[in-house]
Image (cartoon, coloured by chain):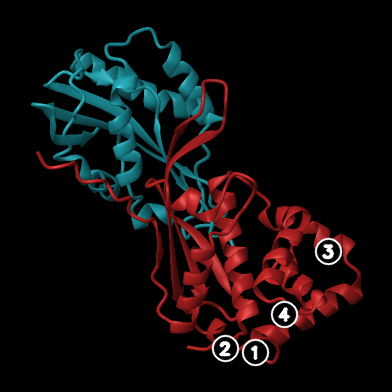
Chain colours: A cyan, B red
Amino acid sequence: MKLTIINLLFLIFPFTNQQESEYKDFRHFVSSKYFIPKSVQSNCNWHYAIVKATIKDRKIIGYKILNETSDDIKKSFKFLTGYRFLNKNIPKNQILVFCLSIENLKTSCDIPRTINYTPTEVLSKVMSGYAHQREIEPNSVFLFNPIISIMEDPRY
Amino acid sequence: VKPPVPVVPVPDIKNNVKDPCLKKMVDAAIKSDIVFDLKQTMNSIFNANTDFNLEFVDNALASNLDGLTDAVQSGGIPAAPNSQRIILTTLSLQITLNSTTLPNASKEYVTATILHEVLHAYFIESHVAFDHQVMFEQYIPWYTSILKTMYPGMDENDMLGLAYGGLQDAPSYIGTLTTLQKQSYKDANERYKSGAKGTPCTK
């Protein structure tokens, strides 16, 4: 539910500065290389990260997590640094902002789900993060469709 | 001008099982390319697509568990604005076989276990929930047909027993099988699991 609402609003959000489809390879790269940190795997609460990647000469030279989150989640994006965009339609230098949502389908964890965010809360967290970044660096490129990393119980 | 070097696809089904007997059984399963339905096989899903990977390992599990299937990495994107479904773009699954109990089991039992876990892997990839109920409703003939091909002399009731193995929590198992059937299938599983019946797993 929460993901669908985020997705819907991202699609009708009134500004766009770059086609999302140009970033297909990058999205694929993130979804295949992202590994959920161990500390998060054992925590059933919802986690997310709004990631700001700095791109110079089509290469990611650094990143920052814009929302408050654990150090483990912050470190879990280290793999981004060094990624090279091969798509020539993408500007050589830019700030790229995307959201990764950790979809936790586990039924039990060491740390049980203690916070049940409402759809509005989820939406506000992500959208206000984007809005804040746009105010600071208006030329940032935003990917509105979240990248989703999924956790679920083993099947026996 | 040198001809282009053909790109050799990297197989994404890995057999990292250590026990020699279980390893051989897993190799045989990969080689036979288990068919799930008319269009999809184990190799077509996990070997042909570099984004979907499957690894077999063996480790000590609780004695009542023969195996488990776990997604070690799973990523996706929203399917469509009006859809709640997530499209999986990457998936790395790991099937763990019980290294304590299975090496003593018969080949028939190990095969049934591998089939059971591979079905879980297929269901994760296909977004199927209520695995054991679906196995009960749709895959019993699938199990028995594979077992019949591999072990032509095997007793039909035993084949059914192994096919129903592990499905005891499915509502249909609880609700539709008679006490006699349940007992008979339980006995078959115990005999094949202990190695008292069936083909010994030769190393």
Read off the chain for label 1: B
Asked if residue A23 lies left or right of residue B130, the reply is left
Report the residue marked by disc 2. B104
Report the residue marked by disc 4. B189
Picture residue at 78% right of the left edge, 70% below the top: B160
Give how far apart the Cα atoms at labels 3 and 1 are: 27 Å
Dots 2 and 4 on the same chain: yes
Tell me which numbered mark, 3 or 4, is placed earlier along the sequence.
3
Report the residue marked by disc 1. B195
Residue B3: image location, x then y, percent: 17, 42
Give how far apart the Cα atoms at labels 3 and 2 are: 29 Å
Read off the chain for label 3: B
Picture residue at 52% right of the left edge, 23% below the top: B80
Above or below, comparing residue A139 to residue B106 in the picture: above
Q: Which mark is residue B174?
A: 3
Read off the chain for label 2: B
Contact? badges 3 and 1 (CB < 8 Å): no
Q: Which amino acid does label 3 sit on?
A: Ile
Mark 2 neighbour class, 10 Å CA radius: few under 14, some 14 to 19, many 20 or more:
some
Residue B110: image location, x then y, percent: 59, 76
Secondary structure under tag 3 reads helix
